[in-house]
Image: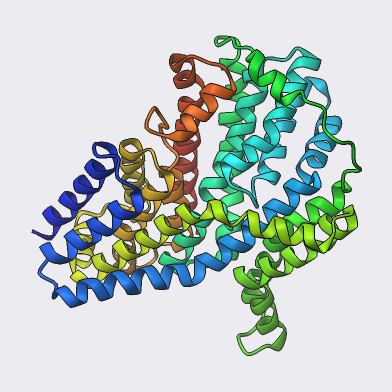
């Protein structure tokens, strides 16, 4: 019966989102309530579990999300993204511009959402395509591959950080392993696949969009490449430093305690945001009023993703408190299914059905979390990566990202399926192969 309840809750969730177009936040809360009531939990405990799950998840992720968004906003407003792009494109040269775009996206994508990074960098793709005559698909696919894989599996992105919290993974190790997985995945799905498919899919910039993006912008000095990259990667470096200290120093060591404090996601992001106020703010001629406006304006769009992640935490808590999670864990243990592969598979199925990477990652984490606790030796860091990789697969017409790519690249639905959808699937499949390989080492 517990297995039936879980399957019904997932079907219920999918129907609400896909058939009735219900907001994922409400759908996840209803699914959590369904699991609690159907499994016989006292009604008061159902409500308490939802509150505890949502509060526990948001208590951590809300701070991380707000700080990460502010850091991304400072980079966007200062022209930092353009500086990174120009420098890498100059270094790689015209012939290898598609490789440069992948690395640009990989770096720029760390502090910003996929959609923000895409809108920031797509004018540059159009400009390069015009100037060099290189196919728009050949340059664009590496860009979206780099942005997508970082968004899916590399902390401090919100869904990845929420999964880190749910699986109780070490954030530094997760970052290190995610880079090991993300780079090869982006290379295969981006420059390599992009070069191949660009010979088969031809497209051109839509005149309407081109005229919009070609509008003259006010000239201003861009920040230096070194200081921009340092600011963007500062939280990642601080988190990795904490992990190194944990491995090399005893627990009671004062240096390790300070490293853990400074390298925690909240402290490291706070430090990076404050540093960005100078390096990408005052240093670029912005006033304190400008910076206040930037940091206020950027928070409004985060509300939806924050609520969905919180509702995912509530669903997770109800699964745990109802005993359904423990039952599934026992079944999975008896069947010898790898929790890492199971996490990827569940996330992939929900992604295909709902189109939402965040919903699929949070739901899969809620189901697989109890299983991982009962199977010794399962790496929580690899579980984070597996659910993230699964949440990227087979983006199609029910995903807003699909239509974003279709319109900007001026492609038909069929060509978007051949380029964007296949690229996302390659990212997901290559990533899980690498993750399963790492599971024998880590």
Residue 288 visible at all:
yes
Display coloring: rainbow
Q: Residue at x 24, y 61 (%)?
A: 32
In percent of width and height, residue 404 lies at: 52, 29
Q: Quadrant of residue 157?
A: bottom right
Along the viewing direction, whichever of 98 and 114 lies nearer the viewer: 114
In percent of width and height, residue 73 lies at: 69, 52
In percent of width and height, residue 113 lies at: 58, 47
Task: Answer left or right for 332 relative to 383.
Answer: left
Q: Is residue 137 above or below residue 298?
A: above
Q: Residue at x 57, y 40 (%)?
A: 115
Q: Is residue 62 above or below residue 430?
A: below
Residue 327 visible at all:
no
Along the viewing direction, whichever of 1 and 22 lies nearer the viewer: 22
The image shows a total of numbered marks equal to 0
Q: Quadrant of residue 101?
A: top right
In percent of width and height, residue 276 lies at: 78, 60
Q: Residue at x 20, y 76 (%)?
A: 45
Task: Answer left or right for 288 relative to 331.
Answer: right
Along the viewing direction, whichever of 144 and 207 lies nearer the viewer: 207
Quadrant assignment for the N terminus: bottom left
Q: Quadrant of residue 218?
A: top right
């Amino acid at each position: 019966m517990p297995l039936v309840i879980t399957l019904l809750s997932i079907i219920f969730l999918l129907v609400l989102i896909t058939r009735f177009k219900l907001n994922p936040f409400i759908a996840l809360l209803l699914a959590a309530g369904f699991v609690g009531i159907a499994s016989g939990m006292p009604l008061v405990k159902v409500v308490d579990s939802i509150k505890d799950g949502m509060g526990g998840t948001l208590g951590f992720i809300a701070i991380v999300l707000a700080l990460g968004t502010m850091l991304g906003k400072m980079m966007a407003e200062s022209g930092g993204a353009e500086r990174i792009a120009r420098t890498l494109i100059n270094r790689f040269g015209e012939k290898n511009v598609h490789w440069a775009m992948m690395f640009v996206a990989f770096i720029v994508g760390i502090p910003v959402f996929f959609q923000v990074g895409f809108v920031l960098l797509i004018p540059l793709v159009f400009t390069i395509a015009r100037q060099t005559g290189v196919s728009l698909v050949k340059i664009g696919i590496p860009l979206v591959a780099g942005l997508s894989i970082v968004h899916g599996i590399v902390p401090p992105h919100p869904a990845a950080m929420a999964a880190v919290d749910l699986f109780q993974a070490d954030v530094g190790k997760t970052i290190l392993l995610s880079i090991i997985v993300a780079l090869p995945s982006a290379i295969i799905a981006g420059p390599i696949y992009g070069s191949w498919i660009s010979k088969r899919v031809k497209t051109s910039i839509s005149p309407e969009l081109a005229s919009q993006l070609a509008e003259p912008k006010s000239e201003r000095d861009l920040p230096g490449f070194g200081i921009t990259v340092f600011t963007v990667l500062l939280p990642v470096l601080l988190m990795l430093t904490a992990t190194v200290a944990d491995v090399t120093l005893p627990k009671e060591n004062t240096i390790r305690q300070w490293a853990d404090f400074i390298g925690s996601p909240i402290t490291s992001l706070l430090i990076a945001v404050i540093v960005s106020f100078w390096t990408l703010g005052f240093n670029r001629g912005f006033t304190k009023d400008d910076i206040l406006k930037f940091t206020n304006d950027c928070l409004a769009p985060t509300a939806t993703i924050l609520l969905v992640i919180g509702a995912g935490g509530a669903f997770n808590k109800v699964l745990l408190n109802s005993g359904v999670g423990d039952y599934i864990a026992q079944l999975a243990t008896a069947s010898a299914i790898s929790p890492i592969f199971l996490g990827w598979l569940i996330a992939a199925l929900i992604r295909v059905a709902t189109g939402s990477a965040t919903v699929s990652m949070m739901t899969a984490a809620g189901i697989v979390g109890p299983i991982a606790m009962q199977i010794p030796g399962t790496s929580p860091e690899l579980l984070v990566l597996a659910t993230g990789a699964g949440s990227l697969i087979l983006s199609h017409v029910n995903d807003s990202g699909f239509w974003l790519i279709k319109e900007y690249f001026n492609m038909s639905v069929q060509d978007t399926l051949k380029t964007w959808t296949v690229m996302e699937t390659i990212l997901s499949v290559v990533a899980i192969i690498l993750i399963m390989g790492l599971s024998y080492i880590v």
